């Protein structure tokens, strides 16, 4: 055992030193907390700005979708000219084959709104004359030229 006065003095020094260390750590923690609070406020402000941008962009997207739908509706037959019943079925069949070269006779009949027998007739006719369809059933350059001359392709 040591001398009591020195023991008390050592205890006081240890307590004082620990208090200084704790005070320094506490001050450091307060500084870090303040910096984090500042950063949190800054990030919350940025999130608010981004949320506003998202809302504005979503609204713009909806306006553009409506505008696109309206334009598509206005263009109608220009998007799928083979559906325009003002044109002869043979022309509509050729147009359909331009857009969907590997379509079946049933798909063509549905796409151009004609009877399947009408499609069968015109495909046989195109094969017979040999200028509109190649051996694989795809339209030829002559068919495209023909459609272009009629203002359809």
Image: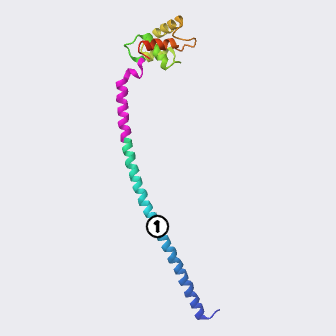
Q: How many marks?
A: 1
In the rendered image, residue 99, in percent from the top left (x then y), is placed at: 48, 20
Residue 52 placement, left or right of 28: left
Magenta segment: does it hold 129?
Answer: no
Q: Is residue 83 visible?
A: yes
Could you say which is closer to the camera, residue 63 or residue 1? 63
Q: Quadrant of the N terminus?
A: bottom right
What residue is rendered at 52% in x and 8% in y?
Answer: 131
Q: Is residue 130 above or below residue 61?
A: above
Q: Is residue 40 left or right of residue 3?
A: left
Dominant secondary structure (helix, strand or loop) of the stretch shown in magenta: helix
Q: Where is residue 43 drawn, in percent x and y?
A: 43, 57
At x 38%, y 20%, the residue is 77
Q: Closest to the observer: 106 or 101? A: 101
Picture coordinates of residue 78 (x, y %)? 39, 21
Q: Could you tell me which secondary element the residue under label 1 belongs to? A: helix
The residue under label 1 is 33
Horizontal and vertical percent for residue 132? 51, 10
**Residues shaded magenta:** 59-81
């Amino acid at each position: 055992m040591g001398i009591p006065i020195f023991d008390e003095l050592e205890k006081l020094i240890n307590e004082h030193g620990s208090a200084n260390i704790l005070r320094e750590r506490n001050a450091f923690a307060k500084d870090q907390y303040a910096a984090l609070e500042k950063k949190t406020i800054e990030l919350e402000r940025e999130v608010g700005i981004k949320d506003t941008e998202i809302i504005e962009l979503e609204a713009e997207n909806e306006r553009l979708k409506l505008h696109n739908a309206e334009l598509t509706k206005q263009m109608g037959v220009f998007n799928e000219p083979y559906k325009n019943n003002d044109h002869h079925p043979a022309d509509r069949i050729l147009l359909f084959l331009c857009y969907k070269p590997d379509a079946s006779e049933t798909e063509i009949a549905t796409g151009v709104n004609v009877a399947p027998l009408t499609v069968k007739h015109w495909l046989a006719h195109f094969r017979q004359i040999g200028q509109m369809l190649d051996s694989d059933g795809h339209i030829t350059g002559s068919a495209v030229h023909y459609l272009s001359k009629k203002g359809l392709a």
